[in-house]
Image (cartoon, rainbow, N blue to C red):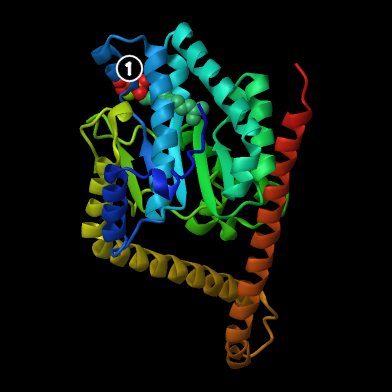
Amino acid sequence: MSWIREETPPDENTWSERFRKFCADVLKTGPIPKHVAFIMDGNRRFARKKGMDRTEGHLMGFEKLAETLKWCRDLGINEVTVYAFSIENFKRSKEEVESLMEIARQKFARLLEEKEAIMKHGVCIRVLGNLTLLPLDIQRSIAEAMRMSKDNDKAFLNVCFAYTSRHEISNAVEEMAEGVEKGLIRPSDISESLLDRCLYTSHSPDPHLLVRTSGEVRLSDFLLWQSSFSVLSFMEVLWPEFSFWHLCAAVLHYQKNHQAIMRARDQHNQEREQALRQADYDSAVAELQQEDPDKTDQSKWASLPTLVRKQETERDQRVREFLQHLDRKRAKFLDSLVQKTE
Ligand code: FPP
Ligand code: MG
């Protein structure tokens, strides 16, 4: 089945669909989270409950994902990130890993066949994780799907696959260390905001709302860095049974907590800015102290504000070029995957 669910023509709308639309319109009078992340948990418990095999549970899980994407679109949520396969999931039985890979193989291939609908809806698809852990043919389909949709900007779908947050954060740290080693950035350029921009999620805002189904109340190594200021909704429902009404309940929960979270987030952003300014000031002072010792103290310190501005401009320039280098490196990696043969 397909990733993109199309609109029902207005003359075929049932009463229940009209009622859903009415409720969505009411919900939209309040703040809507622009980015929602889902830990789609409970597929196997659902399969057990219904006497199905596990693979069928995961397939139902995929159907629910496609349905949920449509509900998000209807509510004006334009970015969704899902946890589809964790690096930890490789420890499951060989049969289950193989069947999940087979689902991924089919679904990512299907994504390429749905190019027209994806371009029509302007969906940018990103698959985030350690792609090198995946079978080559899946890596190739993923790379093609990402390249095909990279310039779309109406909606964003991030599929975390072969992903854990710890891997993502260590990868970002390695990138920064390499940047220092190559002389692209200085150790003093390393900051929270730079790490943010080295994560796989660098092109997305942090999720406003994170939903986990199945009653588990952990993050399981998902978006640990990015979810500090997200509203968390842990729901008792198994993922294949998730409904539009569960999504509405999670959005209501977000609306109730929205103001307090925004306040905390804004304060944190101000503190970050302050820390950057302090780092520029400290570098300027260090530079002044090494300068010509003959200069009188007074004339030295008079040039401090100019020097602070210079530090800021130079840091911005180094960081910009480093991030462009990282983007090019990641794009080149995707290109190499498309061309790779078994
Ligand atoms: C968690 O339920 C679900 C997964 C590990 C797999 C999720 C995969 C899909 C929904 C298919 C999506 C595929 C693509 C390509 C996007 P669980 O297996 O942990 O179930 P349990 O908690 O009941 O044991
Ligand atoms: Mg589980």
Q: Is residue 92 above or below residue 26?
A: above
* Front one among 19 and 14: 14
* Front one among 124 and 290: 124
The percent coordinates of residue 242 (x first, y second) are 29, 34
The percent coordinates of residue 39 (x first, y second) are 36, 35
Judge whether residue 285 can be spotted in this image. Answer: yes
Q: Is residue 194 above or below residue 104?
A: below
**Residue ID at (66%, 28%):** 141
The percent coordinates of residue 216 (x first, y second) are 24, 30
**Residue ID at (57%, 41%):** 126
Residue bearing the label numbered 1: 44
Q: Quadrant of ligand 2?
A: top left
Q: Which amino acid, by three-letter code, is at mark 1? A: Arg
Judge whether residue 231 can be spotted in this image. Answer: no
**Residue ID at (58%, 70%):** 283
Q: Is residue 85 above or below residue 66?
A: above
The percent coordinates of residue 54 (x first, y second) are 37, 12
Q: Is residue 25 above or below residue 276?
A: above
Q: Could you tell me which quadrant the C terminus lies in?
A: top right
Report crowding for label 1: few under 14, some 14 to 19, many 20 or more residues within 10 A (C-alpha): many
Quarter of the figure with residue 22 = bottom left
> Does any atom of ligand 1 lie closer than 8 Å to the CB of label 1?
yes
Say left or right for 44 vs 204: left
